[in-house]
Amino acid sequence: MIRSQVKTLVDQCFQQGVEQGLWSDAAANLYNVEVPRHGGQGDFSTNFAMVLAGKEKRNPREIAGQLVDLLNQDEDLLDKVEIAGPGFVNLFLKPSVWSTVLAPISEQGRAFGLSDVGKGKKVMVEFVSANPTGPLSVGHGRNAILGDTIARLLKATGHDVTREYYFNDAGRQMRVLADSLKARYLEKLGLENEFPEDGYQGGYINEIAQGMINEAGDSFKDVEDQTLFRKRAQDAIFADIDTTLKRIGIAFDSYYNEHTLYEEGMIEDVVAELRKKDLVYEQDEATWFKTSEFGMEQDRVIIKNTGEPTYRLPDIAYHREKFRRGFDWMINVFGADHIATVPDVLAGIEALGLDKSKVHVVLYQFVTLLRDGKQVKMSTRKATFVTVDELVDEVGVDALRFFFLMRKPDSQLEFDLELATAQSQENPVYYVQYAHARLCSIERMAIEKGVALPVLAETDLSPLQEEEEYQLLKTLASYPALVADAATDLAPHRIIFFLMELSGNFHSFYNKHKVVTEDQQLTVARLCLCQGVKAVLANGLDLVGVAAPEKM
RNA sequence: GCGCCAAUAGCUCAGCUGGAUAGAGCAACGGCCUUCUAAGCCGUAGGUCGCAGGUUCGAAUCCUGCUUGGCGCACCA
């Protein structure tokens, strides 16, 4: 926005300097224009002279002086230019420039902040992907919110996004699940049963068993085939997962069942292709993949001596399928405990001659749940986990999403239930939402007092001259670039930090200055500013899936 | 033993991919409601950016080596 105007200006001066023989073009695209951290260092600052000095072994302050002369030809943007420190050139904008940010916000409305930096790139975000063995737990919650928000960000920046859920309803885990259900079923009928040693102990199994009894009594008691029980468990649990996801605002574009890979022969196909490249061999009745040829310490089994593939093989086949479906960028959201599987799959992709740089794994660290100040130990089997549903019951969807996004994926996330529930008033999500509600309240008040909401194009913005007003305008102006960066860096937490900053700017402004006053000119100008802040807050909140309430 | 992630204020964490004097929220202390929502604001205090080297005009940020914590290292997923 305004920053890019300034960047363009500096670029033009750079070019002029090249044409005038002041310097070579060695530093093209290497310098930057950024917002300095401290006050008094201008609205923007460039390291131009120092970068160039490094390239040409000259005195940076001398180059800075030449750049300043060129910049001083500008009449529209700049108020003054200074050389500072080791050779920074600090640019001070004409104050009136800042209010120009309000026009695009007003014109674009909900679309302000969106961009086409993705250029329609076809991207798949695969996330959650939990097998249907139980309700979604806290870890899945972080996965779900992270994946969903990354998808939202990419969509907002012009990517063609597909959200996919990959799951597997076969395999050992599901067999144990079926056995667990059957045992509970028999148990409830008062019949002899044997609960599997490593069975799933969650109460949800009992509920499913009870449902079967309510429906059909004991008619399943002699069924030997486990398929029935597996299907009952899977259907019930999947429906449950789906309900939870809907509840936290998440919908998938497609679901992919591992079965498909078998049914359509893609598993054998991958093995055949690897074999053709002499990358597999048989040993101890198992089939091995030469991962050692791709920088790994040892080879890995892809087909067990039982004839059953290990998880690697379908994972590789699945990724090949993603490539075949034409995705340019494949993002997987995995918990840190899956780190070990990543190199194998990447090796497989490489082995198949595909471009592994198109696959990006977002690894998020664990969520530590604190209850009564103590860490809650969680285990899916023992059902000592806290579910996403329970969390939502306690803190609500908005707080859940906000909290899960407050930390970058790389950081462990501490979720203190007491803090999130008992002190919900101090919850940062309210800080942001409250700012939005206040803005709505101001508009209501203005209308009540007979002040019509202004039309920006007809409003003189020159009365906006307070420091707090400039601060708000500057923050607003930084929004579009922030969204673009957060998206391409897969860093949703930056949106959260932006929202807190903008809200903070607004609360400060609000406490120091009154919007609706006797001064007509000032009132309408400030109402325009408020409309801009409100719109950007709403857009940002929408981007992370948090509500923007009009009243609190 | 090997791999990945982290280490920044008392606590929880940012730090825009190498910039100038280190940032926020809680917690602590002191102030601000007859005025558009006090779920808010203002001020004070709080730091050897885990340790040691290296790279350069310049390092919390990049490289190497250590230390501590978390997660992994299956013919489980």
Image: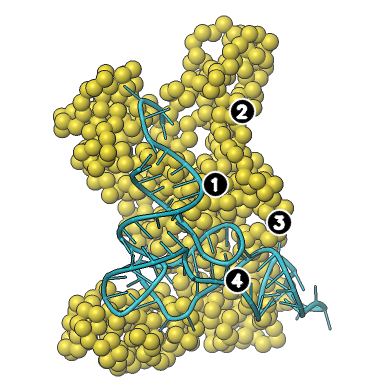
Chain colours: A yellow, B cyan
Q: CA distance from mark 4 to mark 1?
A: 27 Å
Q: Which residue is mark 3?
A: A423
Mark carried by residue A367: 1
Q: CA distance from mark 2 to mark 1?
A: 21 Å
The image quadrant that residue A464 belongs to is bottom right
Q: Residues within 10 Å of mark 2 (few under 14, many from 20)?
A: some
x then y, percent, for residue A470: 53, 81
Q: Residue at x 67, y 15 (%)?
A: A188
Q: Which residue is mark 2?
A: A202
Q: Answer above or below: position of A547 versus A481.
A: above
Q: Chain of mark 1?
A: A
Mark 2 and mark 4 in contact? Answer it, CB < 8 Å. no
- SS label for mark 2: loop
Q: Earlier in the sequence, mark 4 or mark 1?
A: 1
Q: CA distance from mark 3 to mark 2?
A: 30 Å
Q: Amino acid at mark 4?
A: Gly
Q: Answer above or below: position of A62 versus A211.
A: below
On the rendered structure, is A432 left or right of A60?
Answer: right
- SS label for mark 4: helix
Mark carried by residue A504: 4
Q: Which-is-in-front pick, marks 2 and 4?
A: 2
Q: Amino acid at mark 2?
A: Gly
Q: Residue at x 50, y 83 (%)?
A: A39
Q: CA distance from mark 3 to mark 1?
A: 20 Å
Q: Give the camera-side residue of A246 and B77.
A: B77
Q: Which-is-in-front pick, marks 3 and 1?
A: 1
